[in-house]
Image (cartoon, helix red, strand yellow):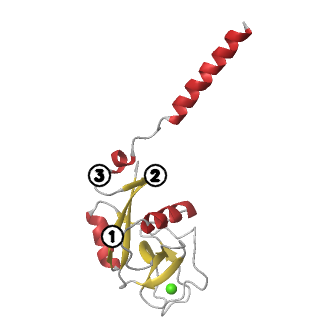
Amino acid sequence: MMFRLLVFVFLITVTYYKVEASPRHPHADYVCGVNGWKHFRQSCYYISADVRNIDDAMEDCRLLGGALVTIDSPLENYWIAEKLNDLPKVDNRFFWTSGFTAADKNRDTTYYWVWGNYKEVSYTNWAIGEPNDKGYVCLAVNRWNGKWSDENCHEKFNVVCEKYLNR
Ligand SMILES: [Ca+2]
């Protein structure tokens, strides 16, 4: 009787781990399509190998069916930076996000930062001394350490687009 019970428990355990080990979600390419979008948590991301200024970056993302990335957590921040570091060609150390100041920093000292969806930036990861630029500035992320900087929106950086799943 005891032996039978042990075998039963063993089989249940094996079955449980087999179920656990099988993927709960379909493969990333299935979720995000096969056009270079990558799946992470609740979003798909497109990471450009080319560099663009902020206006062209925004347009590129729109044409691809997404928008410039919004970074809501340290995990998301580092996941994207890591993916950028995998690119074979490195043109510069920054990539663009959808973040920008909702006021002209030259005229208004009480400026604040919002994402492209106009949600105020809550999680922040500014590099020491940042933000420090004046005028037309946008939120860029340093690919090597994930830290943020305000940069002139006319600068050409790699582009990260995001589209949300289940929305
Ligand atoms: Ca800066």
The spot of residue 99 in percent (x, y) is 45, 74
Q: CA distance from mark 3 to mark 1?
A: 16 Å
Amino acid at circle 3: Val
User: Mark 1 or mark 2: which is in front?
Assistant: 1
Secondary structure category for the residue under label 1: strand
Label 3 Cα neighbours within 10 Å, binned few <14 / some 14-19 / many ≥20: few
The spot of residue 75 in percent (x, y) is 55, 60
- Mark 1 vs 2, N-terminal side: 2
- From the image, tell me which residue sits under label 2: 42
Which mark, by number, is residue 34?
Answer: 3
Query: Is 98 left, or right, of 66 in this rendering?
Result: right
Amino acid at circle 1: Ala
Secondary structure category for the residue under label 3: loop
Amino acid at circle 2: Gln
The spot of residue 29 in percent (x, y) is 34, 48
Q: Quadrant of residue 152?
A: bottom left
Looking at this view, name the residue that lies furthest to the top: 1
Instruction: Compare residues 54 and 107 and report the one nearer the observer.
Output: 54
